[in-house]
Amino acid sequence: MNIGAIEAGGTKFVCGIGNEEGVITERVSIPTTTPDETISKVVSFFKDKQIEALGIGSFGPVDLDKSSSTYGYITSTPKPHWNHFDFVGGLKKHFSVPIGFDTDVNAAALGESLWGAAKGLDSCLYMTVGTGIGVGALVEGKLVHGLAHPEMGHIMVRRYEGDNYAGRCPYHMDCLEGLAAGPAIEERWGKKGMELQNSTEVWEMEAYYLAQAITNYILILSPKKVIVGGGVMKQAQLFPLVREKVSNLLGGYVQSEQILEKMDEYIVPPGLGDNAGLAGALGLVRK
């Protein structure tokens, strides 16, 4: 089956061609600008590919309620120009094929469960830490939806001692995303994360915030694997710091071998690397 896949992010759209086994044969990256300009380039990429279905994992918030008049829309996003944009409807005008639609992080969680670090597990959590922070979850083999969809990147966290940065989330200021996403790091320290790799305090603080969030996710959802990707997590020193802090915060309360003895196999980078979201979009079509 020839499947089109879109990982729609706030910085770039990654479009690809693949199959129901998660094999990606072609991919292209398109900068996220205005909807008209971006979608025009997306349509141009797919128009001669003879796709039989299309899977979309999108930045959000998005409307996933199929009974809603705004199903398939990007809703209250802070991304300029994309507020209340009819994403699925816009693509249906060009492609008369089945379309699978979910958040980018739910798609990535699905992809990792099918072909990546959580392969064979019916439960996992995927967290991305980059331009924003998003989290998707698979529980008992199903992607988590509800009143809308989880927004675990916007939970409240305790302040790191001495951190007086106001936070940059336009809705909540100092939520997790407001304090720990890539733009917050750059604004707080005056440099991009890649320029701060040798600064111990930067990554101690970052790990402090991420570990609090992951601890909460473990206590609420009890995932069998926690997968953390995104540009900020390219800092290799973060994983050991996060694992150590999560262990300390849990304090032995969760009596699981994975938590107590195999933390380095439990909180891990994506098995699919930078293809997690794109492969997950293929998986949405399978679903």
Image (spheres, grey):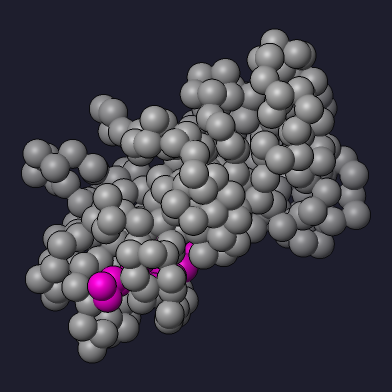
Q: Residue 236: where, in percent of width, then height? A: 79, 53
Task: Name which quarter of the figure residue 192 lies in.
Answer: bottom right
Whether the magenta-drawn stretch holds residue 14 is answered as yes
Indicate left or right for 68 with 32 as reference.
Answer: left
Q: Residue 267: where, in percent of width, then height? A: 67, 39
Q: Furthest residue to the front?
A: 120
Quadrant of the rendering where the N terminus is positioned:
bottom left
User: In the rendered view, would you say 185 is above or below 215?
Assistant: below
* Residue at image coords 56%, 60%: 272
Indicate left or right for 133 with 187 as reference.
Answer: left
* Residue at image coords 30%, 72%: 4
Q: Furthest residue to the bottom?
A: 48
Task: Name which quarter of the figure residue 202 lies in.
Answer: top right
Whether the magenta-drawn stretch holds residue 156 is answered as no
User: In the rendered view, would you say 260 is above or below 113?
Assistant: above
Q: For residue 81, say whether it is visible.
A: no
* Residue at image coords 24%, 43%: 63
Q: Residue 25: where, in percent of width, then height? A: 43, 80
User: In the rendered view, would you say 99 is above or below 23?
Assistant: above
Q: Look at the magenta stretch and give its main secondary structure.
A: strand
Q: Residue 217: where, in percent of width, then height? A: 55, 26
- How many circles with numbers are drawn on the protein? 0
Q: Nearer the viewer, residue 283 or 69?
A: 283
* Residue at image coords 67%, 45%: 268
Indicate left or right for 277 with 63 as reference.
Answer: right
User: In the rendered view, would you say 167 is above or below 113?
Assistant: above
Q: Furthest residue to the top?
A: 253
Magenta highlight range: 1-15
Q: Nearer the viewer, residue 41 or 163?
A: 41
Q: For residue 61, say whether it is visible.
A: yes
